[in-house]
Amino acid sequence: MIRRQELQELLRRELGGTARYLSLYLSVDQSVAVNLNRGFEKAFKTLVREVEGSLPAEEKESFAAAVRRAADFLSEYEPQGKTLVYFADGFGDWLWWRNFDVDLPVALWWGSRPYVRPLVEARDEFERSGVAVTDRARARIFSVFLGRIEEKVQLAAEEEVRRFDGAGMDRMRSQMNFQRKADEHARRHLKRVAEELERLSLSEPFDRVVLAGNREAISELKDYLSERVGRMVVGELAMPVDAPEAEILKRVQEFLCDVERKTETEIVDKLLTAAAKNHQAVAGWQETLRAAHEGRIHLLVYADGDRPLGRQCPLCRRVFLDESECPDCSVSTVSLADLLNAVVVDVVNTGGEVEQVLGPAAQRLKSGAGGIGAFLRF
């Protein structure tokens, strides 16, 4: 996994002059046949060949050195998860790598910054979620993030309530007393579950909360949640408390995917409406690029699949669709292999958020705004 602070440190990395970074996203999933017997090393060599032929002569030597270091790393690497992300600078002084349990686009990049857009998009798509699976006597609380599930807490009612086996009126009174005690123990238990959710959401902040387990217990639990945690609840799932972690992860991810697609549609509709009214929102490439340069973007919204070329001023770092000269610095701009990556870096570095939209929301944004827009701070 990757913390937001760690991601921002990657985003801020940039070296001057001719120094460059090698960025590698490599599928290492051992359930995929081509990755077996270290097939991912062959895939790396293929990616290298695709990039090295297009490099200018002055960069070929440093690129070759960075490739050798990456190949040495891979020769000793033991695959874990689904995707390896590897960044290294051209000097050989800095290295960063992580395993991820989600599929990320396979790519190799060589440029003035680590290529972080896939990581930003993964954090958006797989937000950290708290999951409470409970009945009226037991509970398990999980954190789900970037395809990984981690059990944080197990809870159980304080004591077992025993039924009195008598006859007549004594038995009736016993049953009433049994039910009263059982209800009281359940209330205490569910209050503890709510308290643990609150505590965990503060120590390891959640973006969303899913309540799962017994429907009756879920209904009661909602009454004890704090207002803050209650606002994060996005839905409920019926499942046994002792369900295997793999099953919980699968069902929660499928559910959250549906939630994310619905949320994206709502965001795009609001964006297009606000932009049409000129109400702290813009739509389309030119206006969005201008707002990004001015540091005005609160939330950048763009459609998946787009990786347009662009240009950038080497002095002020402003990005353009096709300007050959920067109007502010009066110098020639340089080409960008991925315009969106530069925009994402600018937005996150100025405190903004990023939302990549997929499916119907992406089609709506492409038809209504060329695939990009933003909500503005001012």
Image (cartoon, helix red, strand yellow):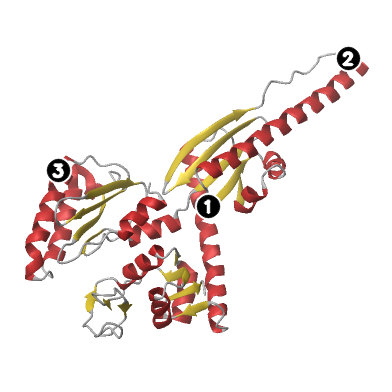
Residue 64 left/right relative to 260: left
Number of marks in the rendered image: 3
Residue 271 left/right relative to 169: left
Q: Earlier in the sequence, mark 1 or mark 2?
A: 2
Of labels 3 and 2, the one closer to you: 3
Q: Name the residue beneath numbered marker 3.
A: 75
Residue 139 left/right relative to 292: right
Whether the residues at callouts 1 and 3 have beta carbons within 8 Å, the answer is no
How far apart, in angstroms, are the residues tagged by discs 1 and 2? Answer: 53 Å
Which kind of residue does numbered mark 3 sit on? Ser
Q: Name the residue beneath numbered marker 1.
A: 207
Q: Residue at x 36, y 51 (%)?
A: 6
Q: Which mark is residue 167?
A: 2
Q: Which residue is drawn at 44% across and 58% down?
A: 124
In this rendered view, identify the residue nearer to me: 238 or 285.
285
Q: Which residue is drawn at 46% across and 73% down?
A: 296
Q: Earlier in the sequence, mark 3 or mark 2?
A: 3
How far apart, in angstroms, are the residues tagged by discs 3 and 2? Answer: 76 Å
